Every structure is written in structure tokens, then in C-alpha cells.
Amino acid sequence: MKLHRVTEKLDVNDADLSGSQFNDANLSGTTFNQINFSGARFNDSNLTGWQVNDVNLSGSVFQNLNLSGAVLNNCRLTGVTIDGVPLDEMIAAWRQSKGL
């Protein structure tokens, strides 16, 4: 399915969007629950206020994004990179620095 120049706010539940491409997309304020985004690519997009719950983001790539105020809860993050940096390593280092 292709969506171009759509201006509706999304509330997506229980969907398989694995391997999807999000280029120059405004997904601000979007809510995703129980979604498979494995292998998806998010490029040059606005994800401010993104609400992501119980989502598989394994192997997803995030480049040149605005993630201000985004909240990710109970997500699979193995292999996720943000601007080329592995996210699981960043989280592990932060937890270790906080003694968690």
C-alpha cells in the first residue's frame, strides 16, 4: 500500500508493517500498538510525540529524524540503529552508568 501526501493522524493497532519505508513522513503524534516494524526504514521524518507500545523494531533503521517527546514502551530493539549507532548498546551503556 502506498500513501502519498496523506494528512490524517494515524492510530495503528496489530499490524504487520515489516520492511516498510517511511521517507519524509510526518508521523508526529501517531500511536502504534502491537506493530511489527522489523526491518523498517525511517528517513528524514518527524516522529515527535510518537507513542509506540509493544512493537517489534528489530533491525529497523532511523536516520535524520525528529524524535522529540517520543515514547517507546515494551519494544524489541535488537539491531535498531539511530544515525548508525546501535540502540541496544546505547541503552545498555546508559543502564550501566545509572547502576540499573
Image (cartoon, rainbow, N blue to C red):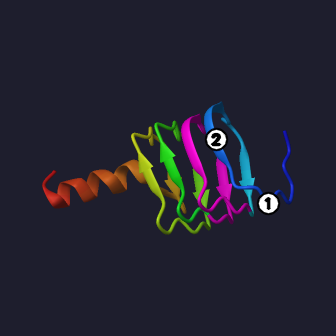
- Say the numbered circle drawn on residue 12: 2
Packing grade of label 1 (10 A; few <14, some 14-19, many >=20) is: few
Report the residue at 18% width, 61% height from top.
97
The residue segment tinted magenta is: 25-46
Q: Quadrant of the N terminus?
A: top right
- Say the numbered circle drawn on residue 89: none
* Above/below status of 80 relative to 50: above
Q: Position of residue 34 (x, y in %)?
A: 53, 33
Q: Position of residue 28 (x, y in %)?
A: 62, 62
Q: Mark 1 highlights which residue? A: 7
* Above/below status of 72 relative to 45: above
Residue 11 falls within the magenta-colored stretch: no
Whether residue 62 is visible: yes
* Above/below status of 36 relative to 73: above
Whether residue 39 is visible: no
Measured in 3D between alpha carbons, the distance from the residue under mark 2 to the one under mark 1, in whole angstroms, is 15 Å
Q: Amino acid at mark 1?
A: Thr
Q: Amino acid at mark 2?
A: Val
Pick whichever, 29 or 36, lies toward us.
29
Packing grade of label 2 (10 A; few <14, some 14-19, many >=20) is: few
